[in-house]
Amino acid sequence: IRWDPLSDCSPWAAKNPKAFRVGDKVLVLFNDAELYPARLIRFGLKNEWMIEFDDKIQGKQWISPNRLFFREEF
């Protein structure tokens, strides 16, 4: 996935946890260097987001906002 510099959504906005909203569809970067599609379902006290993966197999988990990227629907 490549970032388009002309798009409205900058990957650097991910460093601001308040740039996201509940229900946003995002891509999550994991240690295996893969991006996984997910949905934001809750914002926590430690400035982390609870995500639910699109495939529903991996369950829900808390994730740091610096691992989140905006996802555009086409």
Image (cartoon, rainbow, N blue to C red):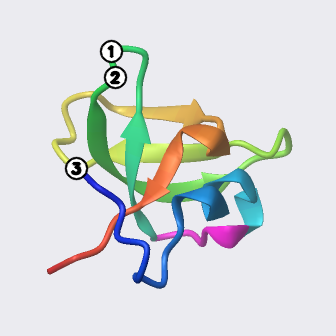
Residue 63 among magenta residues: no
Amino acid type, label 3: Asp
Q: Where is residue 23 in the image (x, y as percent from the top left)?
A: 46, 70
The span from disc 3 to disc 2 (Cα, nearest Å) is: 18 Å
* Residue at the image position 16 percent from the left and 42 percent from the top: 55
Q: Where is residue 6 in the image (x, y as percent from the top left)?
A: 41, 83
Callout 2 touching callout 1 (CB < 8 Å): yes
* Residue at the image position 71 percent from the left and 42 percent from the top: 48
Q: Which residue lies furthest to the right in this view?
A: 45
Mark 2 residue element: loop
The span from disc 1 to disc 3 (Cα, nearest Å) is: 18 Å
How many other residues sit within 10 Å of disc 1, few (<14), some (14-19) or many (≥20)? few
Amino acid type, label 1: Asp
How many other residues sit within 10 Å of disc 3, few (<14), some (14-19) or many (≥20)? some
Q: Residue tagged by mark 2?
A: 33
Give the answer, above or below, for where 11 lies relative to 1.
below
